[in-house]
Image (tube, rainbow, N blue to C red):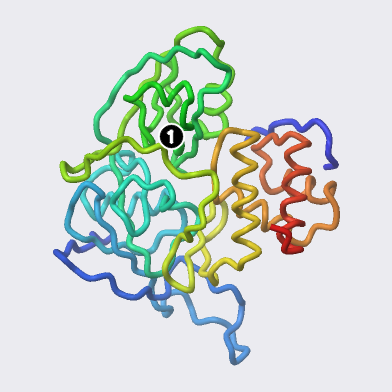
Amino acid sequence: MPLGPWRKKNKSTKENLVENEEVSGGHAGAGSQNKSAVNGAGLPPPPANLRPRLVFHTQLAHGSPTGRIEGFTNVKELYAKIAHAFNISAPEILFCTLNTHKIDMEKLLGGQIGLEDFIFAHIKGIKKEVEVYKSEDALGLTITDNGAGYAFIKRIKEGSVVDGVKVICVGDHIECINGHNIVGTRHYEVARMLKELPRDRSFTLKLVEPMKAFEMLEPRSRGTKPASDNKIGTGRSTLRLRSKGPATVEDEPTEFEEKAVKKVDDLLESYMGIRDTELAATMVEVGRDKKNPDEFATALDETLGDFAFPDEFVFDVWGAIGDAKQGRF
């Protein structure tokens, strides 16, 4: 549909645990697809049961033996595999980081995992309830979600309202707002709820912080900066997880893709108060071959019908993709 007011649409085997095992190179995978439909000889790919498997190594971030997981195609299935490996329930997992046990939002697992990346799962820790006085329109929070129904705090702006409430930390899962349970609510809706809270009044948040080992206790972090030059992934190929459709093994993002995704992610924070690299990557992918903003808007509506984007945001995203194509960043 052309640009204009948009309406929001409705819508086994247990893994072995091993002590002190080194990370091995990635293998190819069950449940993943190659980018091309045929192999180098022009023949169809081998059946799924004859393809080598993608195996990843994982630990619980607060400390655990090493587990091996495989056979997942999206984030929910990934959490289920990790939960099975460590004999916990999948809803206990708040989010995962890559190659670090720390609550580092620059290493947050998003839509891509390098084939040699080590996955650390952060599980639920202490629950806390805090009252916040909204003295300004903007709280200074950036919200993201874990892809499985939990919204959590990705960044706290220095000097903001929330920055003055020291019990609120980056990585905290927002469970309730004023007694209303928001588990299962998408991050952009949570950001909207917080933005619409009346000014000059207090509100209550129920939060769940990630479990920490004693040696991990450290000063509160404000989270990732709006634009980071760090790349997620150490391997030359990555497993691309998608909310819809199967996972695929792809080459590392190109310089164009990295710059465009970073810029679109910044625009998501500016317009909607969220950061979501998977969503940003999908938007860049949708806009890669579109010829004008109306065509891009129509494709976004078809691909991401559960989002309602302002016209100005769509124009800015279209411009950002064009700038990246022309190397103007």
Q: Nearer the viewer, residue 148 or 313?
A: 313
Residue 10 in the figure: left or right of residue 180 = right
What amino acid type should be assigned to the residue bearing mark 1?
Ile
Q: Quadrant of the N terminus?
A: top right
Residue sitting at 44 percent across and 50 percent down? 106
Callout 1 crowding tier (Cα within 10 Å): few <14, some 14–19, many ≥20: many
| Residue at the far front in the pictured view | 159
Q: Residue at x 64, y 50 (%)?
A: 263
Query: On the image, numbered disc 1 is attached to which residue?
Result: 153
**Tally of marks:** 1
* Image coords of residue 265 (percent x, y): 60, 46
Would you say 105 lies left or right of 15 here?
right
Q: Residue at x 49, y 14 (%)?
A: 134
Residue at figure coordinates x 77%, y 50% from the top left = 319
Query: Is residue 130 positioned above or below 243 on the image?
Result: above
Most extreme residue toward the bottom is 41
Nearer-the-camera pick, 243 or 61? 61
Give the side of residue 98 with respect to residue 37, left or right. left
Quadrant (top left, top right, bottom left, bottom right) of the C terminus: bottom right
- Which SS class for mark 1? strand
Task: Please tell me whether residue 165 is drawn above or below residue 269 in the rendered image.
Answer: above
Name the spot of residue 260 as percent of width and height, x first: 65, 56
Q: Position of residue 115 (x, y in %)?
A: 41, 69
Residue 272 sits above or below residue 50 on the image: above
